[in-house]
Amino acid sequence: MRGLSAEQFRDILDELNRDYRQQGRPYRVQVREQGCELVVQPRFRSVLDRLYGSTREARLSPAALDVLALIAYRQPLPRQEVEALRGAESASALRQLVRLGLIAVQRGEADQREVAYSTTSRFLAMFQLRSLEDLPRTQDLQKL
């Protein structure tokens, strides 16, 4: 935000979350890699489940997991590069991941036909990550 230092911004968010807590609000502001997100407190999840239905468990195919891992570690990644790295067609896995809200399509600025894929805040939440920096790092992953 213009005119605020990072420390001032954090202080304002802390004060806002403190006010929410004192007022018994069911939500809080959580800092994410790409910005901030309003999230429901864990103790109020049951209310959300009653309103919207409980979260369905979706099983990902091995191909979808491969694609998701490649995108998570190398994003933004175009489909052609995903397929080159996997050595297999990946369009159906990409569609499934977009439909589940785990990855998003990013359009190129110069050419609207050029697209790349990156992970979403839903991906971070589902895997209980604060940011992409929390992804595991090993020597094996560098070979991706």
Image: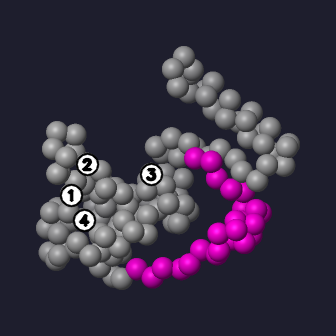
Identify the residue position indicated by label 3 in the image.
133
Q: Which residue is mark 4?
A: 144
Quadrant housing the C terminus: bottom left
Judged by depth in the image, the label closer to the viewer, 2 or 4, is 2
Q: Earlier in the sequence, mark 2 or mark 4?
A: 2
What SS does tag 2 mark? strand
Disc number placed over residue 78 in the picture, else none: 1
Q: Amino acid at mark 3?
A: Glu
Q: Are marks 1 and 4 in contact (CB under 8 Å)?
A: no
Q: Residue at x 76, y 53 (%)?
A: 26
Label 1, label 2: how far apart the Cα atoms are = 10 Å
Secondary structure of the residue carrying tag 1 is loop
Instruction: Point out the tag, 1 or 3, that comes first from the N-terminus.
Output: 1
Observer able to see residue 79: yes
Find numbered disc 3 in the image and state the secondary structure of the residue it sits on: helix
Q: Which residues are magenta?
A: 37-60
Q: Identify residue for label 2.
A: 107
Q: Quadrant of residue 36?
A: top right
Disc 2 to disc 3, how far (Cα)?
24 Å
Contact between marks 1 and 2 (CB within 8 A): the answer is: no
Q: Are marks 1 and 3 in contact (CB under 8 Å)?
A: no
Give above or below for 105 relative to 29.
below
Residue type at mark 4 is: Leu
Q: Earlier in the sequence, mark 1 or mark 4?
A: 1
Q: Amino acid at mark 2?
A: Arg
Disc marking residue 109: none
